[in-house]
Amino acid sequence: MPQYDVYPNPSRSAAEGLPYVVVIQSDLLDALPTRLVVPLALAEATPGRAPAALCPLVSVNGQRLHALAHYAAPLPARLLRQPVGNVAAQSSTLVAAINAVLSGF
């Protein structure tokens, strides 16, 4: 499962406002049964309330989404079925957001 692949959110109850999750876990840990993911929120659903360092904007198939790094969580890999995109080109902003969670900016 490639790092930075984007998947539909497997949580039906949360998928309306958080339609996708992005795998941030290294490919080197593919033997694990879980993947560390960051949920992606619709940009229009979080206007002006998302700190840029913690919730950077990413683009998935032309759609603008906020990566909610502070909500990073493990999901069973079996729930992530068909990727809809990959945001590896935007990896530096995702890594910086995770670093903000760990170090406080």
Image (cartoon, rainbow, N blue to C red):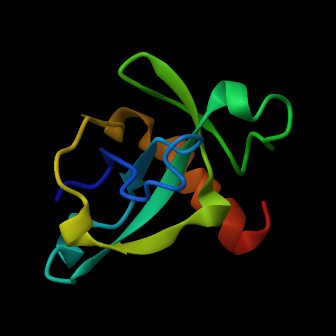
Which residue sits at x=21%, y=82%? 33
- Closest to the observer: 27 or 50? 50
| Image spot of residue 14 (x, y percent) | 54, 53
Tell me where residue 35 sits by quadrant: bottom left
Q: Position of residue 10 (x, y in %)?
A: 36, 57
Q: Is residue 83 left or right of residue 23?
A: left
Left/right placement of residue 19 relative to residue 100 reads left
State the quadrant of the N terminus. Answer: bottom left
Residue at left offset 29%, top offset 67%: 26
Residue at (64, 39) in percent of width and height: 56
- Position of 104 with respect to 72 (left or right) is right
The reply to whether residue 99 is visible in this rendering is no
| Residue projecting furthest to the right | 48
- Rendering coords of residue 93 (x, y %): 55, 43
Label count reads 0
Q: Position of residue 103 (x, y in %)?
A: 73, 71
The residue sitting at the top extreme is 62
Question: Is 83 located above or below residue 47 in the figure?
Answer: below
Residue at position x 62%, y 52% from top? 68
Question: Taking the image as drawn, is residue 37 in sight?
Answer: yes
Would you identify the image quadrant in which residue 28 lies?
bottom left
Indicate the quadrant containing the C terminus: top left, top right, bottom left or bottom right. Answer: bottom right
Drawn side of residue 5 relative to residue 55, left or right: left
In this view, the residue farthest toward the front is: 13
